[in-house]
Image: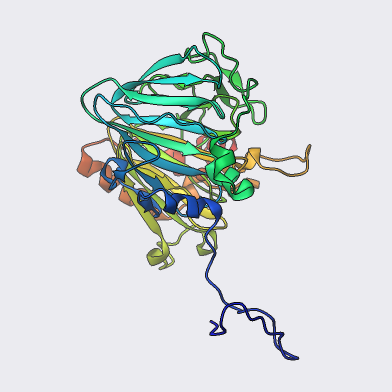
Amino acid sequence: MHDTPAGHWHEPKAGQNAGFGSFKRAAMPYDRFMESEGIPVYRSIGARRMQDLPLAPWKRLGGRGTYIQLFGTEGLWGSYVVEVPGAGALNTDKHLYEKVVFVIEGRGTTEVWQDGETKRHVFEWQKGSLFSIPLNTNHRMINASSAPALLYCGTTAPNVMNVIDNMDFIFNCPYSFTDRFSGAEDYFKPKDDLEPDPVRGLAMRRTNLIPDIINTQLPLDNRRSPGYRRVEPFMAGNRFYLWIGHHETGRYSKAHKHMSAAVLLCVKGKGYTYTWPADLGMTPWKDGLSDKILRQDYEYGGIVSAAPMSGDWFHQHFGIGKEGLRVSAWHGPNNQRSRKAGKPGEQLIDAGAIDIKKGGAAIPYYMEDPNIRVEFAETLKKQGVESRMNPEFYDSTSSAADELGDVM
Ligand SMILES: [Fe+2]
């Protein structure tokens, strides 16, 4: 570190480098913005229940809240929890960043309108609802009951703020994005139709509101565990990418690795996630490296950063409840591998769903650390839940094991 008074720059002598050599990471505009809001900023790999995070009165938005910035997501997307007081409302909000909202607890309505519009679009929400606020529209959250409501919001605020760095413009921009919000009467009417997403061909729903993602039907996907179900909602024309997935009771996902961005939100069941750096290898328990493995337990309303540090981290999710494990994974904008910038037309594969020995990034069950299977079985037993990890899933010669790794 340096002890040179600020404001005096000294040219290095021959053979010396300019600068301090070591330095503290600077706060980005979004970090400074969060600090200026006067509410806590929660930084961790996850939380067992967001319902238990400390909240503080939030002057700008009304209600009480906390920012959440899980490790690995810094600069990629932002999030917060806000409590709407019983029989109360938040202040009207409008911003030049996208926002998706999951209702952790409570019941209420949201009003949405463009600048200059007298008519307000109003829709209702309840525990388990997922919706998106169209870019730069006015909106107001109103609590319909006497109990507080708790909302988990994901945003592209860091992406916008870290480039524009002018909060007045971001909160007071007069432009109406009518391409994002047409003003159509049925804009917030839930839509159930499925179509293949245009990039990977996975099941997609074009809808700006899903009333209950805890119980909504999900189509079969099979990519992460046998019987796995999944849908990706395409909401409000957003770049913000997210999906909802469900592992059957008594089964767990295969480990896979990719860069940071995804945060898993537990919306049904309970469980735990292991995550470890890829350079520890595929069997870190067996190899005596278990002290370097991170674990986050969660239940309804819990969150975990899937690959919490920079670079590739393996991660694996275990549902231990009778109802299986349902998660919603939020990636922010342009971060998920299939949505990232690169040379257009380049051939990519669905690496996270393809086994390592076939060129993908997933560890097939039969190659994983034996500790994983043993611990899962013991944990389920304690919970009184039957394991449904069939022996053939672990048999490298069985066609079942082979097919599991080959499903795109
Ligand atoms: Fe993942």
Q: Position of residue 303 (x, y in %)?
A: 38, 43
Left or right relative to 58: residue 2: right
The chosen color scheme is rainbow
Q: Residue at x 30, y 22 (%)?
A: 107
Above or below: residue 260 compared with residue 79: below
Q: Residue at x 36, y 22 (%)?
A: 215
* 351, 403: nearer the viewer: 351
Is residue 253 among what the camera can see?
A: no
Residue lying at the far bottom of the rendered structure: 14
Q: Residue at x 46, y 54 (%)?
A: 71
* 389, 311: nearer the viewer: 311
Above or below: residue 168 compared with residue 173: below
Q: Position of residue 264 (x, y in %)?
A: 43, 41
Q: Residue at x 41, y 44 (%)?
A: 317
* 170, 393: nearer the viewer: 170
Q: Which quadrant: the C terminus? A: top right
Q: Position of residue 4 (x, y in %)?
A: 57, 84
Above or below: residue 369 compared with residue 389: below
Q: Position of residue 258 (x, y in %)?
A: 57, 49
Residue lying at the far top of the rendered structure: 185
Is residue 111 among what the camera can see?
A: yes
Left or right relative to 8: residue 262: left
